[in-house]
Amino acid sequence: MTFDVVFALDDSSNVPASDWSEMLSLVNGFIDNIAVGFGNARIAVVRYSDDATIAFNLDAYRSNDLVKNAVSALTHSTTGSSQRNLAHAFQVTLTNLLITGERYFAAKVRASFWPVAVTATMPDCDSRCCSTVIRRRTAAGIEVEL
């Protein structure tokens, strides 16, 4: 079965190095339980703090080992911002990976957005911003699940 998974990693300075390592282990543990490659899963990673950036795109790596190596190589920005702009991570994921990016050809996309976090407290998403993004994406034929 072909499906895409985008992990959103909290790269803010609020995340201790031990939690960053645990997040990467969680992602790699997930990857251990799926098949990555042509006709199977594609994996991307988005990092966020006050801004969100794509660490690697859906088509960057075509095997479990290559994806796990890329995830393990991600370093945590301990001197970055303490802000957690989850809404921007959501927007970058939908706009750059699922609409105008590598999934532009899909007639319908179901996006489940699950930010990776080790602690029980997740950053608040600005509901106004998320609602606007969701309305735009729903109009574009993308089903959004938070």
Image: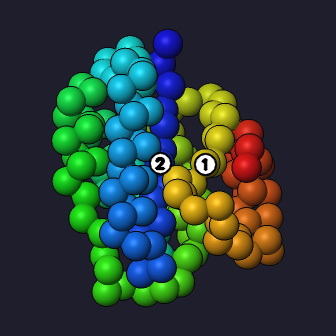
Q: The residue tagged with tag 2: helix, strand or loop? A: strand
Helix, strand or loop at mark 1:
loop
- Tell me if mark 1 has few (under 14), some (14-19) or many (20+) residues whose alpha carbon lies within 10 angstroms of its own: some
The spot of residue 82 in percent (x, y) is 48, 85
Marks 1 and 2: CB-CB under 8 Å?
Answer: yes
Tell me which residue sits at (40%, 73%) in the image: 16
Q: Which residue is mark 1?
A: 114
Real-space CA distance between mark 1 and mark 2, rounded to the nearest whole angstrom:
7 Å
Q: Amino acid at mark 1?
A: Trp
| Residue 120 in view | yes
Viewed as shown, does residue 137 lie left or right of 26? right
Q: What colour scheme was applied to this rendering of the protein?
A: rainbow
Q: Whole-percent x and y of residue 87?
A: 63, 68
- The mark found on residue 7 in the picture is 2
Q: Is residue 121 left or right of residue 8?
A: right
Give the vertical position of 105 relative to 74 (above or below). above
